Amino acid sequence: MKGLYWLSDAEWARIEPLLPRGRRGARRVDDRRIISGIVHMLRCGARWRDCPPAYGPYTTVYNRFNRWSRQGVWHALFEALTGHSGIYGSVAIDSTYIKAHRSAAGGKGGPSARPSGARAAAGPANSTD
């Protein structure tokens, strides 16, 4: 269990009132354990399938993250914990972080060998009459 992340009592007290309630279906797994698992997986950058079993089934951890992402729950939780929404009005992207395909600058095969329309009209006919 060493190296696992668990929400502190203070963090849990701040976000517990913001969690969705009243969902129908199967009994929900402990929210605190699942959220701790989500934060752990986002911090370590591993695949969801590699989620430690202490947080519960990896499918539950991933499904909760995915469903709450679509519902916008994470924005409210993030703002409650940090005091900032995490959404910025403008951003800058440095081109060193964007991968481009090797032929993104132009078409394959280099420059075209076809003459322009004016040169083609002035030159000899292509047919042999």
Image (cartoon, rainbow, N blue to C red):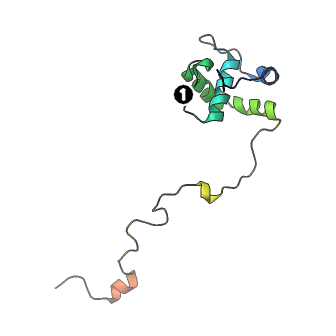
Q: Position of residue 80 (x, y in %)?
A: 80, 30
Instruction: State left or right for residue 101 relative to residue 74.
Output: left
Q: Is residue 90 visible from the viewing direction of this image? A: yes
How many marks overall?
Answer: 1
User: Can you name the residue that lies furthest to the left here?
Assistant: 129
Q: Nearer the viewer, residue 11 or 119?
A: 11
Secondary structure at numbered mark 1: helix
Q: Residues within 10 Å of mark 1 (few under 14, many from 20)?
A: few
x, y (%) of residue 50? 54, 28
Residue pictured at 75% horizontal, 40% vertical: 86
Identify the residue at the far top of this view: 27
Per the image, the residue denoted by label 1 is 50
Q: Quadrant of residue 84?
A: top right
Horizontal side, residue 10 vs residue 46: left or right: right
Task: Tell me if residue 49 comes above or below residue 129 in the rendering.
Answer: above
Query: Which residue type does callout 1 highlight?
Result: Asp
Residue 9 in the image, given as x and y percentages of width and height: 80, 20
